[in-house]
Image: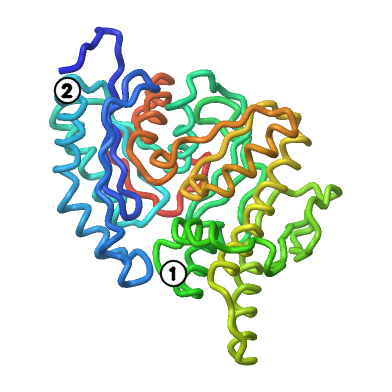
Amino acid sequence: MTEKNMSDTLILGIESSCDETAAAVVRNGREVLSNVISSQIDLHTIYGGVVPEIASRKHIEKINQVIRLALKNAGVTLDDISAIAVTYGPGLVGALLVGVAEAKAIAYAKNIPLIGVHHIEGHVSANYIEHPDLEPPFMCEIISGGHTHLVIVKDYGEFEILGRTRDDAAGEAFDKVARAIGLGYPGGPKIDKVAKEGNPHAIEFPRSHVTDTGKTSLTFARGNQEMTDYDFSFSGLKSAVLNYLNKCTMMHQEWNQADVAASFQQAVVDSLVDTAMRGARDYHVTKFAIAGGVASNSALRAAMEKACAKNGMKFYRPSPVYCTDNAAMIAVAGYYEFQKGARSGWDLNAVPNLKLGER
């Protein structure tokens, strides 16, 4: 067993919102004692994306094993756990139900407090793990397969949403474009890898900007400082890539996979960085963070770090293992909810379309 003070708070985190079955033990909201992730990528790759029914069944098969291993790696037992934090939304409803049911069963059997955690709040909280100096308020851009948000983190668990995607999330666009150019699933890491071999300026795909009137303008210009809205749109960019591929096919022209990947990735990065920096300047931000699966993209991390330095802001980002779905981030978010006195009842249920800020 790890050396533990009576004042220590140990949170067991459980995450099963999509295709990773994960459990972790975190001490006092910042120190990860264990972080176990059972990935299903190989199972879903042949289908080109996550199959909800398969994901749910695999969660049932793996969740007890993952929790036992997380406790073992942390050197603790359930008797040492102060509270159980579990993702209850958003996500795939069947997958979420597995984690929620498991957490409720353990909490009831061991009389341990139960805390439902918003998945996106977990992604933001991943930044606290490796950055002990980071405390609210700060601005965060959350970029994942299903979500793209620009938010002000006003306090732990308190957010002001400045912008969100109007259509495809950035990660969703990565997956769809990767499939179209023959890379398959998962699209994000595969495009990131192949793009390193391509020319990001070979094809000038449009950058999308959503105006405050709700209209999306696709332009080749960057910046567009006069706009005041911070929403995102990636559907037009995805369509532009598909149109380019179709045009090449119809005209019997060859296209370069690495160049398409690099040019598409550059367009996404430009949109994410430009919108983020515009918001940061407008709100006089001094601390800026990124979170979510796409935050592990090497081109985005480099561009965002450069932009933050240029604008005099301190830049925070989780290590890639904490960008993708994991239970450590859920335990961290759960710790701060626990400290505020938040507790969930036995009626806690999966909420697949849970919005950020909802309880």
Q: Nearer the viewer, residue 317 or 328?
A: 317
Q: For this view, does 140 lie left or right of residue 63?
A: right
**Relative to 108, residue 268 above or below:** below
Q: Position of residue 233 (x, y in %)?
A: 65, 60
Viewed as shown, does residue 293 lie left or right of 151? left
Mark 1 vs mark 2, foreground winner is: 1
Direction right: furthest residue: 226
Q: Quadrant of residue 5?
A: top left
Work out whether 117 lies above or below 191: above
Q: Position of residue 131 (x, y in %)?
A: 49, 24
What kind of residue is marked 1? Answer: Leu
The answer to whether marks 1 and 2 mark residues whose Cβ atoms lie closer than 8 Å is: no
Residue at 65% from the left image edge and 73% from the top image edge: 240
Q: Amino acid at mark 2?
A: Val
User: Vertically, is 186 above or below 162?
Assistant: below
Quadrant (top left, top right, bottom left, bottom right) of the N terminus: top left
Circle 1 Cα neighbour tier, 10 Å, few/some/many (<14 / 14–19 / ≥20): some
In the rendering, which numbered label is found on residue 76? 2
**Residue drawn at the location 65% of the way across and 67% of the way down:** 237
Mark 1 highlights which residue?
183
Q: Quadrant of the C terminus?
A: top left
Q: Which mark is residue 123?
A: none
Determine the image quadrant of residue 87: top left
The residue positioned farthest toward the top in the image shown: 6
The residue furthest front is 197
Residue 305 % position (x, y):
63, 37
